[in-house]
Image (tube, coloured by chain):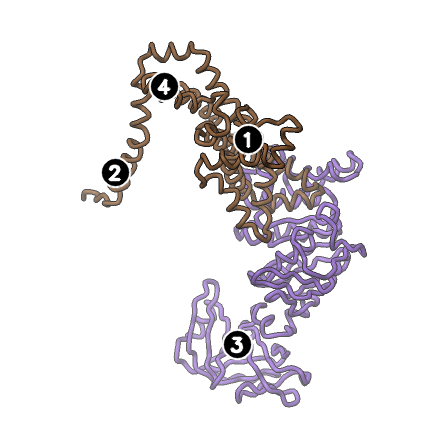
Chain colours: A purple, B brown
Amino acid sequence: MIKIETLRIELPGFTLQNVDLSIKDGEFFVLLGPTGSGKTLMLEAIAGVAPITSGRILVKGRDVTYFPPEKRGIGIVYQDYALFPHLSVLDNITYGLRYHKADAQASRRRVNDLIEQLGLQRLSQRSIRYLSGGERQRVSLARALAVNPSVLLLDEPLSALDPNFREDIRDVLKKLHREVKITFLMVTHDFVDPLFLGQRTAILNHGKIEQTGPVSDVFERPATPFVAEFLGMKNVFPATFKGPMANLDGIKLPLEKTPGNHESYVAIRSEDIIIRKDKISENGMSMIQGKIVDIIDRGLFHEVSVNAGKVVFRSTLSKRDLFLLNLSERRDVFIGIQSSNIHTF
Amino acid sequence: MKKRIDPFFWIAVFSTATIVVFILFPLIEMVIQPSFQDLKETLKDPDVLHSIGLSIYTSGLAGIISLIIGTPFAYLLARKSFFGKKLVESIIDLPIMIPHPVVGIAILGLAGKNHWIGQIMQQVGIQIMGTVTGIVTVLTFVGLPFYVNTVKTGFETIPVRLENVSRSLGASLTKTFFRVTFPLAWRAMLVGIIMCCARAISEFGAIVIVAYHPMIAPVMIYERFTAYGLKYSQPVAVWLILVCLVLFLLLRVFSLPKEKKA
C-alpha cells in the first residue's frame, strides 16, 4: 500500500499542495491531470528522485520519505522509455538484478518469463536503437519488473506511442497487472486510460487533488466543474435547485433526485444529448427547443451547438445521424436530455 | 526557370573564405617557409626535442589533473541547482578572461615565501618557481575551465531520467555514474581533455613568469626568436604544430562514435 500524507513540494513557479492519497495493495491507480498539473513531479517524489518540502510517503507501512531511490523498492517507467542506449535489450532488462539479493536461478526465470510475456524473445540481443516505440516500452516495463518492485510507477507510458502501439501497450499493462499482482500507479492526461485500466483514480489540477474515488464514481459524479470538463463533459453549467428540479438560466430540467445543499452545477455529456427535428415524448426525457448555432466536424463525429435561450448545449452526432436528420446551421431543433444523464455537484 | 541564389548565400561564402584564409594563411606560410634542411637540423637539437616533449608531458598532466578534479565538479554543475551557482560558474571562467601574465603573478604570489601557503609548500618540499610542478600548476589553472565547461555540457546532454531509472533499479549514485553516466559521457570527457591540453600547450604568458626554465616549447620559440631571429624560431614552431596536430587528430579519431550494427 502507498500512503501519501500532506505531501508538499515547492518549486519556483509551482507548488504541489499538501496532497493526501492512499493506494491499496495490488491496485491499478490512475492519477489524471492536464499538462503542468504536477503528476510527474508527484511520481518522481514517490520514486525518491524529486526533493519534497514536507509530508510523508509510506510504502507497505514503511516510511520511505527520506530513503534514497535505490532503497525504496519502487520501479519507474517513463513515457520516453529512458532505456540505456549503450546496452542491449537483454542488458537493459537485467540491469538491476545485481543489486537485489535474489536467487540467480529465480531471477533468470523471472526475466525469461517477462521476456516471453512481453514478446521480446527475438529482440533480446538487439541494440535498443533499432526498436519501435512499442517495443521500447515493453523493454522498459520488463526492466522495471525484473527486480520485482513492490510498486510500479508509470509516467504517461502511452503518450509517446502511435495510436496502434498505444492500444497494444494498454492491453499489455492490463494483462501484466493481472499477472504480476503488484501496485501500479500510472499518471496520464488521457481520461480513456483510467476507464480501461484503472480501479480508482484521482484528478490533479494545479498541484491539488480535486477528486479521488473509483473510476466509475468519478466519471459519473464529478465533484468540480474542472473535473467534469476534464473528463469530457462538454456541458457544465451553474444552476440553482428547487427540489428535484434544476434551473439553468431559466431552463428547467427535472432531476432523478434532489441535489444536496452544497451543489451548484449540472453537467451533461455531449453524447447524452439527442437532437430531433420534432418534439418527442419519452419517460424521463426533457425536450428543449433551440436553434443550431454551430456544427463542427471532429473527424469521426460532429459536434453540434444548440442555443436554447441563454444556454448553449453541445451534442455529439455521428456523420450518419447528421445526414439522416439533414441538420444545418440556424435550423430550429429540439434537444432531449434524460434526467438520469444529468449530473449535479 | 533558373534557380535564384539568395544574396545571403554569397555573404556566407565570403565570410567562410575570409575566416579560413585569415587562420590558415599565416600558419601555412610559417610551415612552408623553413627549408627541409632546417627542419631536419632542428629535430637533431636535444633542447628542442626536450622542450616539445616537456610541453606535451606537462599539458597531458594538466589534462589528467583536470579529469580527476574537474569531473565531479562538472557533474555537480550539470545536475544540481544551488544558491550561488551562477557565481561559481563565473569563477571557473575567470582563467579564460584574465591576462595570462596576471595568472603567473597570482600563482607566484600565493606560492612565494611571503604567503603562508607558500611557506607550507616549501616545508613539504613543493617548489613552484622554475619547476615542472610550477608549469603543471599554471597549465592546469588555464586549462581547467575548458575541461569543466566541455564536460558539463556533455553531462547535460544525458537525460537525468536514465540516472533516475538506474537508481530505482537499485544502483547507488556512484554505481549509476560508472554504469550509466560515464559510458555515455566519456567522449565528452575526452574532448574536454583535448580542449584543456590544447589550451595548456599554447600557454606562454603565465609560464614565463612562473617557470622560464625548464623550457617548454612556446618559451623556447620565444627565446630563439629574441636571440637569433625568425629563421631559428620557425622550425621549432613548425614541429610543435605538427606534433600537436597528430596527437589531437589521433584523440579526435579515437573519440568518434563507431557505427554499430543492429
Q: CA distance from mark 4 to mark 3?
A: 101 Å
Describe the element under mark 4 as helix, strand or loop.
helix
- Read off the residue under disc 2: B14
Describe the element under mark 2 as helix, strand or loop.
helix
Q: Can see residue A23?
A: no
Identify residue type, mark 4.
Ala
- Between disc 3 and disc 2, the foreground one is 2
The N terminus of chain A appears in which quarter of the rendering?
Answer: bottom right
The C terminus of chain A appears in which quarter of the rendering?
Answer: bottom right
- Between disc 4 and disc 2, the foreground one is 4
Identify residue type, mark 3.
Ile
Label placed on residue B227: 4
Q: CA distance from mark 2 to mark 1?
A: 42 Å
- Between disc 1 and disc 3, the foreground one is 1
Crowdedness of circle 1 by 10 Å Cα count: few (<14), some, many (20+)?
many
Q: Chain of mark 2?
A: B
Q: Give the percent coordinates (x, y) of residue B154.
A: 53, 39
Crowdedness of circle 4 by 10 Å Cα count: few (<14), some, many (20+)?
few
- Between disc 1 and disc 4, the foreground one is 4
- Read off the residue under disc 1: B137
